[in-house]
Amino acid sequence: MDRDALPFPLAAGYTTLALNGAKGGATKYLCLQYLNYARWTSQQFSCNLPTSLQIMASLHLKSESGQWTPLGFLKFWRPAVTLLNETVHWGMKVPLCMALYQELRSSFGAHGGLAAATALSTAGEVALTGWSERFGVHMGLKQIGSYRESLRIACEARGNLLLGAWAGAGGLWVRNFSWNFTFFEWKRFLHNAVDRTPENAPQWFQDHLDWLRSLEKKNQANVLTFEAATLGTYLTFFNMAGDNIKTKMQVDPVRYTSVRATAGEIWTQHGLLGFTRGSLFKGIYLILGSTLAIGIQERLTEIMAALLR
């Protein structure tokens, strides 16, 4: 067994892995987008959980006359470009990093090669999905009905098409890289630990590994993905900070013109806590979403690989 390899099924090829990841990303959007919207709201206003829920309810679940409008819940899934964003994002995340890692590991080692591969693959993610991420945040939170109008506002604020369309790209890269790298490292470590218990492991961890070994392989992979996603989310401050910076720059490109200025304002007004706003919503959304998306990716890929044998 290659203990330095990333533990994802590759027998059916990178294309199959990417297509199944895209299916997982689309499913994640359809099932969990309301949590994503709640995270954006909390980050936009740098507020806590009760306040963000109150804002969402007042904006979308009540009319101007004060009447209850439950169908306003559907607005959390607008604009539909977020579906494209999630589909492409999760379709390329695992296979692109794996392909780059195979090329770089011999030169930079298991950890350095993974860091370099993740940095490059994350740049690819931002290049292909940064514009759709910006549309989703800006149009969703501002309730802008026109893609043209959203792009016009961003471009006028940032000075040109590239900076306007990819507003918040720096924060997006920080967020994605920190989570991707931490997730891949934990995923690999946990799979290796199940295969062979680490030396000097505490008893509670040994007991947990024994329980994991008792599961079917497909269920074991899902649990390990959930655990790696949890560790990758809550043990990475830069993931939270980058996400807050990214959201503010995308929802208000006129006010937040650069990563440095946005970070400075968050620090001045809210302190260190400001960089972690929305972390509860983000944690639930990202942990459940990645477990769902990657779980679908792994299971479908293994099924297709078995059919090809």
Image (cartoon, rainbow, N blue to C red):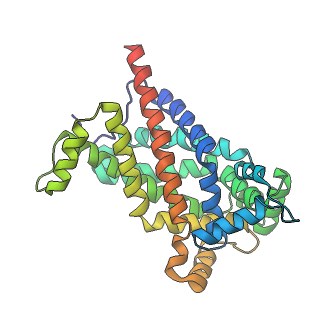
Count of numbered marks: 0
Percent position of residue 177, x then y: 47, 56
Question: In this view, which residue lies farthest toward the right?
Answer: 65
- Residue at point 54%, 60% (across, down): 281
Residue found at the far front of this picture: 67
Q: Quadrant of the C terminus?
A: top left
Could one spot residue 248 in this view of the protein? no
217 on left or right of 143:
left
In the image, what residue occupies the spot 41% across and 40% down?
98
Residue situated furthest left in the rendering: 200
Q: Nearer the viewer, residue 64 or 237?
A: 64
Image quadrant where residue 106 sits: top left
Determine the residue positioned at 56% across, 33% down.
23
Q: Nearer the viewer, residue 267 or 293?
A: 293
User: Is the residue 162 above or below the residue 117 in the image?
Assistant: below
Residue 291 appearing in the image: yes
Seen in the picture, residue 136 relative to 254 is either above or below; the reply is above
* Residue 279 image offset from top left, x and y in percent: 51, 65
Task: Tell me residue 123's x, y (percent).
Answer: 54, 52
The answer to whether residue 302 is left or right of residue 52 is left
Q: For this rendering, which residue is in front, 11 or 236?
A: 236
| The N terminus sits in image quarter | top left
Horizontal side of residue 224 vs 268, given as left or right = left
User: Relative to 158, is 21 on the left or the right?
Assistant: left
Is 219 drawn above or below residue 184 in the view shown?
A: above
